[in-house]
Image (tube, grey):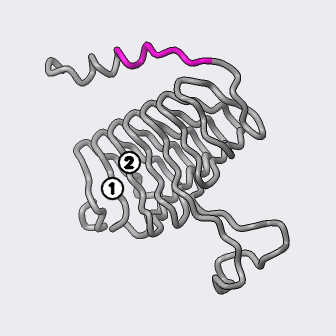
Amino acid sequence: MTAMGFASMGEDVRLSDRASYYNCGGIHIGSHVRVDDFCVLSAGEGGIVIGDYVHIAVYCSLIGKGRIELRDFSGLSSRVAVYSSNDDYTGRFLTNPTVPDEFRGVEHADVVLGRHALVGAGSVVLPGVVLNEGAAVGALSLVKKDCEAFSIYSGVPAKRIMKRRQDLLELERQLRSPEN
């Protein structure tokens, strides 16, 4: 994998050779990471930072000019799209990357998935969103706003539906203990 020119890479990293990686010099990958088939990781100016124990399931895409960060133990289920850039669809501007920037109204903003944050299958996360530690998003949701820590969200747009248990923090402590 070092031949691909990633900015950094930890141990026990499994990257599918059927996924696409763009601007690898802007992608940092921690340890115990898996990226499945047919994913697209396209690092913009802000780059992509993937922590430890992160899984990016089949057909996911991480795209945009802003920074995209997936912190330790976070995960994306299949067909999740994370955007750190988004065209303005109001009709005030032209759209798509073939048009010069001065004619476009693109929003660029960082996206962060905190530790233990999860995004369910088929969901979309838009620019500027922070999924705080332990936030979980149900399948087929549209995340337009920040999500509170250890809360579960679902819907279009995603809304908070309940608290999430924190037992996993003790399991993380056990996993990271020197005995393991």
Q: Which residue is mark 2?
A: 50
Q: In the figure, is residue 3 to the left or right of 161? A: left
Q: Position of residue 167 (x, y in %)?
A: 43, 13
Q: Identify the element where label 1 is drawn.
A: strand
Q: Which residues are drawn in magenta?
A: 163-170
Give the mark nearest the N terminus, 2 or 1.
1
Q: Quadrant of residue 153?
A: top right
The verdict on residue 166 being magenta is: yes
Residue found at the far right of this picture: 91
Q: In the figure, is residue 17 to the left or right of 6? A: right
Disc 1 crowd rating (10 Å Cα; few below 14, some 14-19, many 20+) is: some
The verdict on residue 60 being magenta is: no
Q: Identify the element where label 2 is drawn.
A: strand
Q: At 57% from the left edge and 50% from the top edge, which residue is drawn?
A: 59
Q: In the figure, is residue 98 to the left or right of 115? A: right
Q: At 63% from the left edge and 38% from the top edge, which residue is drawn?
A: 121
Q: Which residue is mark 1?
A: 28
Amino acid beneath label 1: His
Q: Are marks 2 and 1 in contact (CB under 8 Å)?
A: yes
Q: Position of residue 105 (x, y in %)?
A: 70, 73
Amino acid beneath label 2: Ile
Q: Position of residue 106 (x, y in %)?
A: 66, 70
Q: Position of residue 91 (x, y in %)?
A: 85, 72
Q: Quadrant of residue 96?
A: bottom right
Vertical order, 71 against 110 (above or below): above
On-image quarter of the C terminus: top left
Q: At 58% from the left edge and 37% from the top edge, which residue is drawn?
A: 119
Question: Disc 2 versus disc 1: distance between alpha carbons?
Answer: 6 Å
Q: At 27% from the left edge and 42% from the top edge, which residue is drawn?
A: 31
